[in-house]
Amino acid sequence: MEENIKNHKVFIIHASEDKERFVLDFATKLRSKGIDAWVDKWEIHPGNILIDKIFEEGIKNAQAVIIVLSKYSVVKPWVREELNISVVRRIQKKIKLIIPVVIDDCQVPVCLQSTVWVKIKNLENYEAELKEIIMSIYGQRDRPSLGKPPRYTQTEIDVLPNLTKVDSLVLKLSCEKAINLSREKAIENGSVYYDIDTNTILEQILDFDISQEEFYESLEILNKREYLEGPRAFNATNRRAEIINYRITFYGFDEYLRAYIMDYDSILKSVASQIVNLNGEGISSIYKSVDQPQIIVDHFLEVLESRGDIKSIKFINGRVSIFEISPELKRKLR
């Protein structure tokens, strides 16, 4: 809530011609809402000094000023004088607000043209405009209440370059799913492919207050940027082709490991050491010696092969055989 105006004292500048047709009813309605509206008819009595009452009591004590702009008031020198004093006090921060209320087709004074004004089209029915004025005086706004932020915005996650937080979260959950599948489907002597069911990740994503539309959009982005790959099927409901049962690419999994596995380099070195030390004993010995899920070990084998440190053969049944270790790899480990 904005800061409230103390005591809600409001001075109403107006022409005498507008008093009966609008101002008195308007000021009465303001007072019924707890706003101490100052109108000369109610405040100035026989024997009072006019200038003292208006300038030393009315405007001086007001925290806000409402000027009623009409075909009468815009040509009144006295109205102009009260407005000028009010503008000066606003500049001096002694008045919080000057609210122009336009009740006729008339020229708004230059000093108020940069101020938002309220236009009243029907003097017999202006409840909506009155509410707007009252809320402004009380420093409130007619807007929906704030709900809780989406869960994913409260989730700590490293956002990968060129990806949004949603994209990064989809990739992270997908890679974690692939790792879990690796634990379930690990084989003794070689790598296995890990197809990820789109609906499984979608269920997790919905728990983060991310919409289905955002999820499929993110999959398309990740696919286009080669973090994942997979076939598409036509969705008759959405009338579009959507990615299903995808796989994480070598690039996508490497980006995940670098972002979320703190000891990337040490695991890579451990895999390389086991390859050199257990040469000839087969891939299964390396899996057993490196305390990591098989999919991570498989990935680092690919990293080493992409660098030319090893050469391997991948058979149709998933079996992997390393047939060459480069001298450079042995030297790196010394």
Image (cartoon, rainbow, N blue to C red):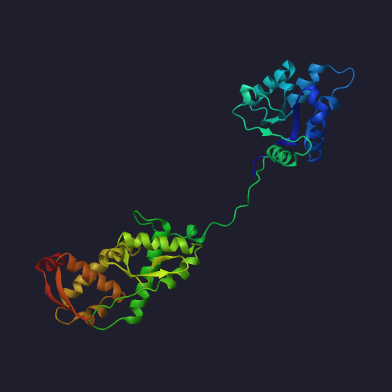
Most foreground residue, 291 or 295: 295
Name which quarter of the figure residue 326 lies in. bottom left
Q: In this view, does 103 lie above or below 183?
A: above
Name which quarter of the figure residue 108 lies in. top right
Q: Please give left or right for residue 90 compared with residue 184 in the image.
A: right
Q: Please give left or right for residue 41 compared with residue 69 in the image.
A: right
Q: In this view, does 274 lie above or below 85?
A: below
Most foreground residue, 78 or 268: 78
Q: Which residue is drawn at 30% across and 66% down?
A: 253
Q: Please give left or right for residue 285 compared with residue 164 in the image.
A: left
Q: Residue at x 83, y 16 (%)?
A: 49
Most foreground residue, 136 or 180: 136
Give percent across and percent down for residue 153.
48, 57
Q: Which residue extends farthest left?
A: 327
Number of on-image labels: 0
Give percent across and percent down for residue 258.
31, 62
Which quadrant: the C terminus?
bottom left
Give percent across and percent down for residue 234.
40, 69
Q: In this view, does 34 lie above or below 202?
A: above
Give percent across and percent down for residue 177.
38, 72
Q: Residue at x 65, y 45 (%)?
A: 1
Name which quarter of the figure residue 311 lies in. bottom left
